[in-house]
Image (cartoon, grey):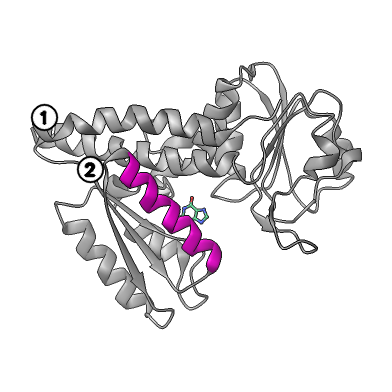
Amino acid sequence: MIISGKELSAKLKAEMAEQVATFPAKYGRVPHLVVILVGEDPGSVSYVTGKAKACEVTGIRNTTIRKPVSITQGELLSLIEELNKDDSVDGILVQLPLPRHISESKVIETICKEKDVDGFHPLNVAALWQKQPCTVACTPKGIIRLLKAAGVTISGKRAVVVGRSNIVGLPVSKLLLDENATVTIAHSRTADLPSVTRSAEILVVAIGRPKFITEDMVSDGTVVIDVGVNRDPQTGKLCGDVDFAAIEPKASVITPVPGGVGPMTICCLMENTIECFIRKMEHSL
Ligand code: GUN
């Protein structure tokens, strides 16, 4: 079964649009998300365009601020600080990766926790690992939604996550653990990786290398979640980390690239923006 993140995200966005439509009467305005894009990286440009489109569909107000790669770290941090203070702004997202002269961790910790729609702020990350209320990172949240919508039971399963990034690998491992899966975190340097991935009943791959997971690495009946977004070196087309054509016949459930996890990430970003907005509005009542 191929699970479509595109379909599920369209349904969830339609529900959010209905909810957002009630906000002007209730709170006097709609949520406002500010997205900052530094430079012209084609991957980042396409993500940011997708985010703007999703805002349009859900009725969320969007401002996209584009800055040249020559912007200094100080200038970017000042911009974030201004947006932190701006009461009309509910969510702030700085598209990653950033040019090498700008520290990503400095940027992430400058966005105030209450407007951190990415869930990357150290206080949000700490709260997640301590099971406290927090903003959950969009991709991991979207993956759990997708698994549940596909009717996959997570509890009691052996899950293997390949990748240990702050954006996907670590938080998705924590969410799977909270759903009572037994989780192994592996990576590109794991010794005998194929024997580890073959033990998975749920396999999540977030490495960023085309066709990194080959047919011999997956057991029959596995649930395969492909988080990779790569260019196929042969065809130049978008592809995941999983050799989809070889593995799809073996998997019980698999996500395609494009159209799998990607749309869910953007959908959960809309949800996080709404959550930040409501929290702020209820707080100031
Ligand atoms: N770059 C790739 N994925 C993400 C994401 O979820 N958030 C941000 N800010 N940048 C990204």
Label 2 sits on residue: 31
Q: Residue at x 17, y 33 (%)?
A: 23
Location of residue 279 in the rendering, given as x and y in whole percent from the top left corner = 22, 35
Q: Quadrant of residue 119?
A: top left
Q: Which residue is at the front of the view, 198 or 231?
A: 231
Location of residue 121 in the rendering, given as x and y in whole percent from the top left corner = 40, 50
How many other residues sit within 10 Å of disc 1, few (<14), some (14-19) or many (≥20)?
Answer: few
**Is residue 156 within the magenta segment?**
no
Q: Secondary structure at mark 2?
A: loop
Q: Residue at x 38, y 49 (%)?
A: 53
In the picture provided, is 209 more to the left or to the right than 38?
A: right
Location of residue 220 in the rendering, given as x and y in whole percent from the top left corner = 86, 25
The stretch in magenta equals 42-57
Say what amino acid the circle numbered 2 marks.
Pro
Label 1 sits on residue: 26
Q: Residue at x 64, y 19 (%)?
A: 152
Instruction: Please say whether residue 149 is visible from this viewpoint.
Output: yes
Q: Quadrant of the C terminus?
A: top left
| Prevailing secondary structure class for the magenta stretch in the rendered image | helix
**Is residue 48 within the magenta segment?**
yes
Q: Quadrant of the N terminus?
A: top right
